[in-house]
Image: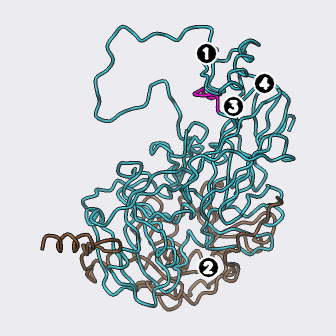
Amino acid sequence: MKTFLLIAISCIGFGQTPRVGRPATEETIKAMDLTVFPDGRGLPPGSGTAVKGKDVFKEKCSVCHNDKGEGRQGQYPALVGGAGTINTPKPIKTVGSYWPYATTVFDYVRRAMPYDQPGTLKPDEVYAAVAFVLNANGIIGDNDEMNAMTLPKVKMPNRDGFVLDKRPDVKAKK
Amino acid sequence: MKTPGTRKPEEELPNTKPSRRNLIALSASVAAAGLTTLAACNTKPAETAPSMLGTAPSKYGNRSPHEAAARSLPPESKTPSTGASRTPLQDTYGIITPSSLHFERHHSGVPDIDPAKHELLIHGLVEQPLVYSLDDLKRFPAQSRVHFVECSGNGRSEYSGNLAPDPQASHGLASCSEWTGVPVKLLLAEAKLKPEAKWLIAEGGDACKLTRSIPLAKLLDDAMIVYGQNGEPIRPEQGYPMRLLLPGWEGNTNIKWLRRLNLADGPAMTTHETAFYTDLLPDGKARQFSFENEAKSVITRPAGGQKIAAGPGMHDITGLAWSGRGKITRVEISTDGGRIWKDAELQMAGFAKAFTRFRMPWIWDGSATSIQSRATDETGYLQPAAEEMLAVRGRNFGYHNNQIKTWFVRADGTVSHVEQGA
């Protein structure tokens, strides 16, 4: 019997797990889940336009990104401009010139902005701020409503600008 | 040829010109057995032990007050929490970076997390969404492994021809630790993956909730969730109380302060895998999801910012090499501007995706020259030269720069990142 037990214990080897994870409730998941996918999954109810976003941007964003999203003194990034520069020797990467998905702008503003108070904007404020930035880049109109249905359909200018990693791409001479 | 015993690094020696007799004595002893110490050459005896008591034992040790190696901080900024600090690679020995000197790269500062309140959520395309505490993770069979972590922006200024002046500035966004934790695949086995699960969206608990999408294959391979670093809990700057460790992959994907793993059918296209950490080619297309850090090496001594104070004679060239694709199998050194390459001795080369220490004895004749190292990894990949890389990637590629680093030795013994007169 003793021998049998010893064998049984020693058989609990690699790959065994302690099964200590506790089931996560829908409530926990909803409270923590911030991810917005390119097809719009994860976008919350709410809406905003560039017109409504002007005040939100001025109050919450312009201290760093300037009144029109042009950035400040190289220290705070520009969100607007740079169209047509990406394939030149001096590319200017902004939301308008470089970012491939509008959903990414929503995801990032909601989780990380304003820089010193991340996570404090309400969904309507996020939609409006995103609409303001897209409009300032000439991508949507002044009164185009951004919501969970319309935002994923926005075609960003650099949507087709990305390719997968092709390394190893540089062959060294021996 | 063997190493001359326990000699101190040349640039740390007293700045006195060695006498001809000392040099001869050194050469003779190296030729004889290679076991001599510098003490044999000293004309003055070492100070004897003091006739007074030392300090009592302490709870948490500090280094000698005579040592001052430090991380370098970025230039003053209005957004310091988005900054980086760099490891003084030239001041480290062996392959392990002291935890206190491990490089930092934060996008919204270091959060203060109470481990008793921290939870990790696994959800999305799993049969059973689960929550784990730190104590829960410690009940899994723990593994300890030695791996480097490197920011893919390490050396990025060199693409544009802006050469960094010393190893800390050029390569200090890389560090190597012994990490302890749980293979991610064990947690995924508990939650049971649905067949549609192909990617994992990993999210940190810092202010910006930094998020990256990771292909499932890496998680089923060697990915870990680690809570230990060099024998103690990981440092707050490294993700306390738990971080994702993706051996060999760009630092940004090794999510710190890990709080959420979301199994999905595709990538989330987060800010840090679209707007940033993508590499712009001359034709305007940008490469995305470039995960592995390719084979790289740098001579850390003698290197930029140092002086070969002892003058001509035998010196030890040493440095670090690493590859995100496996083990380092060879490091070659050139001391004549890349014409002749000689094999360096590898030390601690047994770990895959970890630092390997290399060294080679060098008789410096006192003339101006340049020194370089190049690494080969177990896939046969050879580290390329700067001009080879530039021809393919252009100057705006940005990240993932693993080109050969050149140090210029001048006749007066100073070592620089640029040629004399440049």
Residue shown at 52% from the left, 63% from the top: B247
Q: Quadrant of residue A174?
A: bottom right
Q: Distance between the Cα atoms at labels 4 and 1?
A: 19 Å
Residue to which mark 4 is pinned: B312
Q: Quadrant of the N terminus of chain B?
A: top right
Q: Disc count in the image?
A: 4
Identify by letter the chain in cyan: B
Q: Distance between the Cα atoms at labels 1 and 3?
A: 25 Å
Same chain for the residues at labels 3 and 4, yes or no?
A: yes
Q: Earlier in the sequence, mark 3 or mark 4?
A: 3
Residue to which mark 3 is pinned: B306
Q: Could you classify mark 2 by the number of other residues whose Cα lies within 10 Å: few (under 14), some (14-19), or many (20 or more)?
A: many
Q: Could you classify mark 1 by the number of other residues whose Cα lies within 10 Å: few (under 14), some (14-19), or many (20 or more)?
A: few
Q: Which residues are magenta?
A: B3-9
Residue to which mark 1 is pinned: B40
Residue B372 in the figure: left or right of residue B104: right
Q: Earlier in the sequence, mark 1 or mark 3?
A: 1
Q: Nearer the viewer, mark 2 or mark 4?
A: 4
Classified by dominant secondary structure, the portion drawn in magenta counts as loop
Secondary structure of the residue carrying tag 3 is loop
Same chain for the residues at labels 4 and 1, yes or no?
A: yes
Instruction: Tell me if residue A74 is in the magenta stretch.
Output: no
Mark 2 is on which residue type?
A: Asn
Q: Colour of chain A?
A: brown
Same chain for the residues at labels 2 and 3, yes or no?
A: no
Q: Nearer the viewer, mark 3 or mark 4?
A: 4
Mark 1 is on which residue type?
A: Ala
